[in-house]
Image: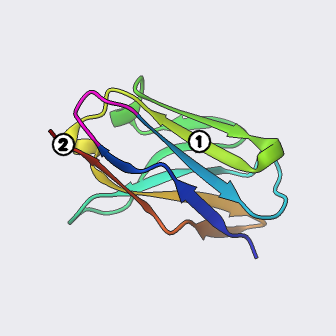
Amino acid sequence: QVQLVESGGGLVQPGGSLRLSCAASGTIFSISPMGWYRQAPGKERELVALSGVTTAYADSVKGRFTISRDNAKNTVYLQMNSLKPEDTAVYYCYLNWRARNFWGQGTQVTVSS
């Protein structure tokens, strides 16, 4: 069973930065899709960024967010810069491993002055 442990959320002012981390227990392939989704109040969960064979970003975060991973540590990161109030959401780590989807518990990111 794979477990995902997230950290790094919090409160930040508009224009600020945060870095989220997600560590997966066990050993996974470096090309296993791993990344971040988010869900704002009253909205559906949406893809933010995904790293696997290729890297994908939501249009709303391109140029501001960067996904990276340390395969030796089974960890994926999300560097979020130039944060906007509309980035406020619960951010969930995601992993697809052996045709199964795994989710972290979620970490709150609040962008507010």
Question: Residue at image x 33%, y 35%?
Answer: 60
The label shown at residue 77 is 1
Q: Quadrant of the N terminus?
A: bottom right
Residue 73, how many percent across, how many down?
A: 78, 47
Residue 36: in magenta span = no
Q: Secondary structure at mark 1?
A: strand
Q: Quadrant of the C terminus?
A: top left
In the image as oriented, which residue stretches furthest toward the top?
A: 63
Residue 107, how many percent across, how many down?
A: 43, 59
Extent of the magenta region: 12-17
Q: How many labels sit on residues?
A: 2
Q: Give neighbour class at mark 1: few <14, some 14-19, many 20+ (Cα, 10 Å).
A: many
Residue 10 placement, left or right of 99: left
Residue 38 placement, left or right of 30: left
Q: Name which of mark 2 and mark 1 comes first in the sequence.
A: 1
* Disc 2 to disc 1, C-alpha distance: 22 Å
Q: Choose mark 2 or mark 1, whichever is in front.
A: 2
Pick the front one: 78 or 29: 78
Amino acid type, residue under disc 1 in the picture: Tyr
The label shown at residue 112 is 2
Question: Residue at image x 73%, y 70%?
Answer: 2
The quadrant holding residue 62 is top left
Residue 69, how many percent across, how many down?
A: 68, 39
- Kindly indicate whether the residue at mark 1 contacts the one at mark 2 (C-beta within 8 angstroms): no
Residue 20, how many percent across, how many down?
A: 51, 45
The quadrant holding residue 6 is bottom right
Amino acid type, residue under disc 2 in the picture: Ser
> Chief secondary structure of the magenta span?
loop
Residue 14: in magenta span = yes
Q: Is residue 17 above or below residue 96?
A: above
Residue 33 placement, left or right of 40: right
